[in-house]
Structures are given as C-alpha cells and as structure tokens.
C-alpha cells in the first residue's frame, strides 16, 4: 500500500498505459481520478478500480480547469499527477503531415502539460508536496523516421520534465518522466501505419528484450517514481524500453 491515502490524477487513463498506471496506483491504495476524453472508457476503468471518472480534454484550458476544481473540491488536494494522455500522427514524411495533425499532436502531448501545471501546481506548491509524472517516449530519445513531429513532441516533454523539476524542487514537488517503447496499446497501429506480422517483426527487432511494453510495465515504473521511495529522484526520464535506446 505504497500510495495509501494519496490522491492521483491519471490523464488518458481510459486505456493503454494510463489504464495500467491507474490500476497499479489503485492496487497500492491511491484514490485514482481516471481522466479521459472518452468518458465511457474512463467509467469502465474507474468502476473496475473503485476510482472516479472524469471527462477531460487535456488540450483545452477550461476542461482542465474544471477537472482541477472538481478534484480539489472533492478530495481537498492532489498528491500525484500523471500526464499520460497522448496522440500521434500516422507515419509520413515530415513535410506531408497536415497542419491539423501537427497542431493536434502538440496540443495533446505538450500544451496539456502546461495546462495541468497551471491548474494544479499552485496547490502542490502551497502544500509543499507532490509528484508529477510525464509519460514521454523513446521517440524523444531515439527518434523513428516518418514520425518526426511526434518525436519532437516527446523530446519537448522530456525537456519540460527537467525544467519543471529544477523549478519545483524548492517547493517539495518532484517531476519525472518515463520513456516507454511501443506497446500493446491503441496507439500501436498508428505508430506502425498498419498492423501486419512483418511490420511487428521489424519493430520488435529494435527492442533487445524482444517484446513490446505493456501497461503493467508502465504501472510498475510509475509507481516507483510517484511513491515516497523515490523521494530523492527528480528530473529523471526513465527508459522503460527493453533496451531500445541503448
């Protein structure tokens, strides 16, 4: 029960890595707010783990502010914030990615981190306690071709994590990131362009451990970084990638 009594918000928690993190946090005693743009998916996970479901569009200030108001009003504080919600564009040469897709990737992957910070960091600073985890990607460390703007958004997230960590450390707030490799989530097909045995084999050939990551892998890493066991860890972008970035 390493998170007993703690309140955690996990964005994009209706599926994939976010769901894995939400499940692990709940199993360790946290009150988990399952935030997702798909409210049905959020309710499904929340019902499973005894959490609270909220519909949130992390790219919109008003939606994020409403989430913060609701959670702070209900629980009084937030101990853990996991910025997991993310999207990608389909594989394409950089000049062929549409402006609409570019804007969506940066709104969901980057602007969301700014918006959740604006909404929740003041209360964490006031309590002089808190842990923020940004779910970045190996794409921000070792980019794959034809995913240029997705790669760039995750590189931004890693740099933002380090900058946030330095600024917030004096206030007792830790900020870390995890860098997952491609996993069995709804985004996998988008990364690959199409899901065929040949393309899967090509992806797997770049992962020394020889398998895709799982939501459980991310839940375990997130648990450590957001628990008091990691009280001396901040500004880290932990690769949870089976050796992909070596």
Image (cartoon, rainbow, N blue to C red):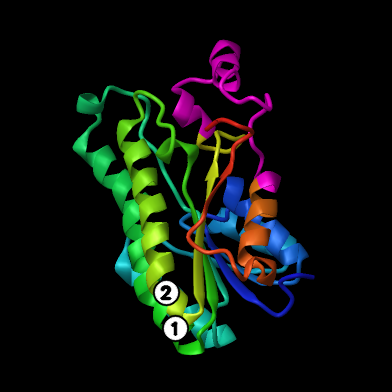
Q: Which residue is situated farthest in the top direction here? A: 198
Residue 5, percent from left and from top: 71, 80
Res. 246 visible in picture: yes
Depth check: 136 or 47 in front? 136
Label 2 sits on a secondary structure element that is: helix
Label 1 sits on a secondary structure element that is: helix
Label 1 or label 2, whichever lies nearer to me, is: 2
Residue at image position (34%, 49%) is 156
Local crowd at mark 2 within 10 Å, few (<14), some, or many (≥20)? many
Depth check: 99 or 116 in front? 116
Note whether 37 is above or below 191 in the view shown: below
Q: Which segment did they paint magenta?
A: 188-217
Note whether 61 is above or below 93 in the view shown: below
Q: Which residue is mark 2?
A: 168
Marks 1/2 in contact by CB < 8 Å: the verdict is yes
Residue at image position (51%, 28%) is 189
- Asked which quadrant contains residue 100, the reply is top left
Res. 68 visible in picture: no
Image quarter of the N terminus: bottom right
Image quarter of the C terminus: top right
Total labels drawn: 2
The numbered dot on residue 125 is 1
């Amino acid at each position: 029960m390493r998170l007993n009594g703690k309140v955690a918000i996990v964005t994009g928690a209706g599926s994939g890595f976010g769901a894995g993190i939400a499940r692990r946090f709940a199993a360790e005693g946290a009150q988990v707010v399952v935030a997702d743009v798909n409210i049905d998916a959020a309710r499904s996970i929340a019902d499973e783990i005894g959490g609270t479901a909220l519909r949130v569009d992390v790219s919109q200030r008003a939606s994020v502010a409403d989430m913060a108001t609701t959670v702070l009003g209900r629980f009084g504080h937030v101990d853990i914030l996991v910025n997991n919600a993310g999207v990608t564009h389909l594989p394409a040469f950089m000049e062929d990615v549409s402006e609409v897709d570019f804007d969506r990737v940066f709104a969901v992957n980057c602007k969301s981190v700014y918006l959740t910070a604006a909404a929740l960091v003041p209360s964490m600073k006031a309590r002089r306690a808190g842990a923020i985890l940004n779910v970045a990607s190996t794409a921000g460390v070792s980019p794959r071709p034809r995913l240029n703007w997705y790669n760039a958004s995750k590189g931004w997230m890693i740099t933002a994590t380090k900058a946030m960590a330095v600024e917030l450390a004096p206030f007792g707030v830790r900020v870390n990131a995890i860098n997952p490799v491609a996993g069995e989530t709804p985004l996998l097909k988008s990364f690959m362009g199409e899901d065929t045995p040949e393309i899967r084999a090509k992806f797997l050939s770049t992962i020394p451990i020889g398998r895709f990551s799982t939501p459980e892998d991310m839940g375990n890493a997130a648990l450590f970084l957001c628990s008091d066991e990691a009280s001396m860890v901040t500004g880290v972008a932990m690769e949870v990638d089976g050796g992909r970035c070596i």
